[in-house]
Amino acid sequence: MVWRNNKMEDLKKLQDDLWDYAETGFKEYKSAEAMCKYLEKKGFEVNRGICNMDTAFDAVYGSGKPVIAILAEYDALDGMSQEADVAEYKPLKDSTTGQGCGHHLLGVGAINAFLELKKIIDEENLEATIKLVGCPAEEAGSGKTYLARDGYFDDVDIALTWHPSNISSVSTGSHQACIQCYFRFKGVSSHAAGSPELGRSALDAVELTNIGVNYLREHIRSDERIHYAITNTGGHAPNVVQAEAEVRYFVRSSTGPRVKKLYERVCNVARGAALMNDTELEIIFDEGLVDIVPNFTLEKVFRDSFIKLGVPKYTEEERAYAKKFKDTYDVDVLLNQTYENVKDVKKLKKNIIESELNDYFVDKDHSDVCYMGSSDVGDVSWVVPTAQINVNCFSYGASGHSWQWVAQGKSSISFKGAIHAGIIIADTARTLIKNPNLIEKAKEELKERLGDQEYECLIPKDVLPHVY
Ligand SMILES: [Zn+2]
């Protein structure tokens, strides 16, 4: 197997441990500690608890300019519990969380990038400072947003990262800005049959909010998204009028100013619901993150490294493993998905039909378009030129936040993806260090794209990282 040496065995164990811990945003205590310990074992000095976040950390190596940051993640998702290596939906009995977005791989891949880059710097006697940045709470909490807001990247020249995927490509385009909040309603409890006239249902207010927002959907931009989850139903007794209830909202739009306006409209719906049924509303602003600013200069350097180094190779055994998961999807559905910016869609579709998993570099055209979904990488990309790649870690068909991704999160396929991502990031950083003009060009590009817009963090200065 590919990881038959000490470094690889240790990294594989780290991957498995992070998968087992599956800790959600700002609660990644064991995960962050395992990564810090790993880095210390390799001889690095680690700073724990940076920018008021217990589970954020960094390790720094080298000296002088340029300063290159490699971003790591490790948080899991609630509602994504799943047994490993089983090709059917099978939640674990003792856990509700799971690595549904592959952030444990992201963390391991980023660490490998840091180790590989250190090796390159030593061997080639390069001048550069490299930082491995442990960024907590990507899924909810926005660790990177606090880092960007609080000036962590002020001395950084370039930020590089990656995300596990089911194709290998250079990530391009923007992603949505997002505001997350809670609407907490207070009503009056009473006997639902005996004295309903005395009650005021907080749960009704939640439902009225959701209904109002579902009507609002028809009158918003097509690049906007609104999602909710009821976080407190006010109890499980239908014969008690619910005195309290709460719903959590994610509001997304293509830019910071736009998402602020849409958020205000959603808040008005909640205010209207409270007015309608005589309940009290508390709006709890949780967090916000801005859109991603793409950087074609960096994308090109990533592309060159990808073309030079190729993609992971798979054994027959791995292909058979991937097939079990691919078979849980309807291939026609997969073929009808939109493959944005892919240069040769025909080739990709042929590969989807013929192969169990993506086994070639999927070349893409650069794009400025805003795609659905959000990441706190957005805040980083506003303050420092930033780019990311995707590396295949799963079978075809699997998509983020699916049980299939969780189930494949300990496989050798996903490990190969993480290790390969590290190698490509390190090679890209090497090119940048050796060609300072590319770093200047990337900075110029960021400046041009922003024009007269200033970075405005959506989280107010006085809000500290938190878990509600
Ligand atoms: Zn993710």
Image: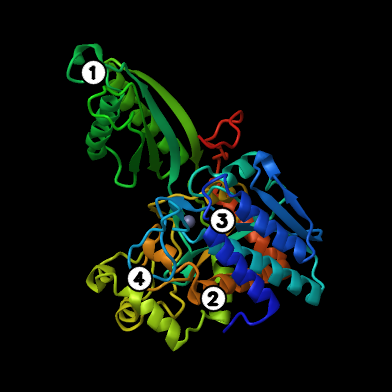
Disc 1 is placed on an element classified as: loop
Would you identify the image quadrant in which residue 441 lies? bottom right
- Label 1: how many Cα within 10 Å (few below 14, some 14–19, many 20+): some
Q: Residues within 10 Å of mark 4 (few under 14, many from 20)?
A: some
Q: Position of residue 35 (x, y in %)?
A: 66, 59
Comparing 67 with 281, the one in front is 281
Evaluate whether residue 295 shows in this view: no
| In the rendered image, the vertical position of residue 128 relative to residue 451, given as above or below | below
Q: Residue at x 63, y 70 (%)?
A: 11
Q: Which mark is residue 416?
A: 2
Q: Which residue is mark 1?
A: 191
Name the residue located 47 percent from the left edge and 61 percent from the top edge.
172
Disc nearer the start of the sequence (3/4): 3
Say what amino acid the circle numbered 1 marks: His
Q: Are marks 4 and 1 in contact (CB under 8 Å)?
A: no
Q: Give the spatial CA distance, label 3 vs label 4.
A: 24 Å
Q: Which residue is mark 4?
A: 87
The x and y percentages for residue 65 are 78, 59
Look at label 2 and name its amino acid: Lys
Q: Residue at x 24, y 11 (%)?
A: 198
What label sits on residue 74 in the rendered view? 3
Mark 3 vs mark 4, foreground winner is 4
Residue shown at the point (61%, 79%) measured from the top left = 3
Asked whether 113 or 295 is in front, the reply is: 113
Measure how far apart labels 4 and 1 are at the Cα level: 47 Å
Cα–Cα gap, marks 2 and 1: 59 Å
- Asked which quadrant contains residue 83, the reply is bottom left
Q: CA distance from mark 1 to mark 3?
A: 46 Å
Q: Is residue 257 above or below residue 26?
A: above
